[in-house]
Image (cartoon, helix red, strand yellow):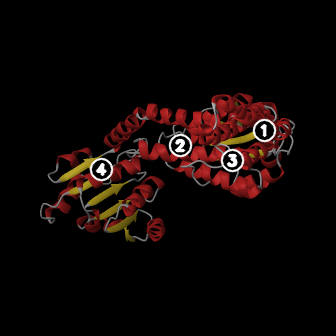
Amino acid sequence: MDLVVIGLSHHTASVALREQIAFTHQQAEDTLRTAGSEDRMPERLLLSTCNRTELYALADTPATGHELFLDLVRRHRGIELASHADTLYIRHGREMVEHLFRVASSIDSMIVGEVQILGQVHDAFEIARRAGSTGPLMHRLLDAAFRVGKRVRTETSIAIGAVSVSYAAVTLASRIFSDLGKRSALLVGSGETGALAARRLLEMGIGRMTVTNRTFERAAALAEELRAEAVPFESLETALRTSSILVTATASPDPIIRSDLVKRVLAGRKNRPLLILDIAVPRDVEPSVREIPNVFLYDIDSIEGLVKENLDRRRREIPRVEAIIQQEMEQFLGWYAGLEATPVIRELREHYELVRAREMEKVRHRFCEKDREQVEALTRGIVNKLLHEPTTAIRELPRGGAGSLARMELVRRLFGLAGAGRKDGDSDA
């Protein structure tokens, strides 16, 4: 049996192909219930997001995993991936573990440091557990992956700093205004980019949010979703007079926020500053607005500069993340190697030899040197006789199959061997 991952991701496949083979949660669960077999692939997990679809498994050979992945995509998505062979990757053993840990840590993501992937891995594990396709190996492996993700979040700065234009724009707002709860914002436009910025402002506690758009119905629909206020586009100037922050994200080919408008608005504001976040392409705000006193104008170029700065900072954290991955890999692979019969037998004999030696130490003073040698030989013989049948039975346990890992873990538990069961610090899957 070998650990194996087969799949494709944003590194290898176009968004069109990734969309075609993506599985919903229910589709993944239904697939896992029927995929694989107890003899050839006893444990399996399907991770499917907008940027990757991957099958993680315990299989008799990597080829088995490859065949199953092609088959499940063919049966459940109607796509022949054999014609897209260059988009697929297969990793097994140590490389599979490293790949999963890199995914869980977010350094394999399209946006390094994104926080959603760890939750998506957790969801994939829960789906596999409901489908009955997990076992002791996947439990232990995913425990380690979750621990990697949590350590990366707490021990590095990989997730710090906005790396989308919308979030970066709002970050600028929080820098300029210390208490957003006392401020109001006006969003011009109803597209996704502007909506993301508005949601982020609401998450950060903006006091009041107003939405306007040339099509009032679209502004009203977005305002209802955001629990904000919608105003007609003709009331833009009036709404702007009471706003501290203006976010513009329209598809207009020409500027809609001109210098004369901003000057009129500021005339009655008693020097209160106005922050304008122009995240539209082409720009919604005339560049000359930047010259007006008490106006802070940031366009897409300046905001993207902040995004690049944050991405560069995240990438500088990658070596620290990789160090955590290596530590957790060695710990997991050490446990995994110990699932074979020979290491278990060695642990068993070392454990009971230690017990024998400790008991001998307690009574050593009662014997002369000659008697001590005889008692040592006698107790060693007793231990060997007691362990003979368990040792033989362990060697004769079936190798591979669904229960091989569970059997070795059970032996450890029965005999109280070091490392049996969960270790301190293991997380709940």
Which amino acid lies under the numbered mark 1 shown in the image of this protein? Answer: Ile
Q: Point out the frontmost of discs 2 and 4.
A: 2
* Measured Cα–Cα span from mark 3 to mark 1: 19 Å
Where does label 3 land, which residue?
A: 416
Disc with the residue nearer the chain's start (4 vs 3): 4
Most foreground residue, 178 or 383: 383
Whether label 3 touches label 1, CB < 8 Å: no
Where does label 4 land, which residue?
A: 172
Q: Secondary structure at mark 1?
A: helix
Disc with the residue nearer the chain's start (1 vs 4): 4
Q: Is residue 127 above or below residue 83?
A: below
Most foreground residue, 418 or 136: 418
Most foreground residue, 59 or 233: 59
Q: Residues within 10 Å of mark 3 (few under 14, many from 20)?
A: few
Quarter the N terminus occupies:
top right
Q: Point out the frontmost of discs 3 and 2.
A: 3
Residue 382's label in the rendered image is 1
Q: Residues within 10 Å of mark 4 (few under 14, many from 20)?
A: some
Place of residue 328 in the rendered image (x, y in percent of width and height, measured from the top left): 55, 38
Where does label 2 land, which residue?
A: 148
* Residue 126 falls in image quadrant: bottom right
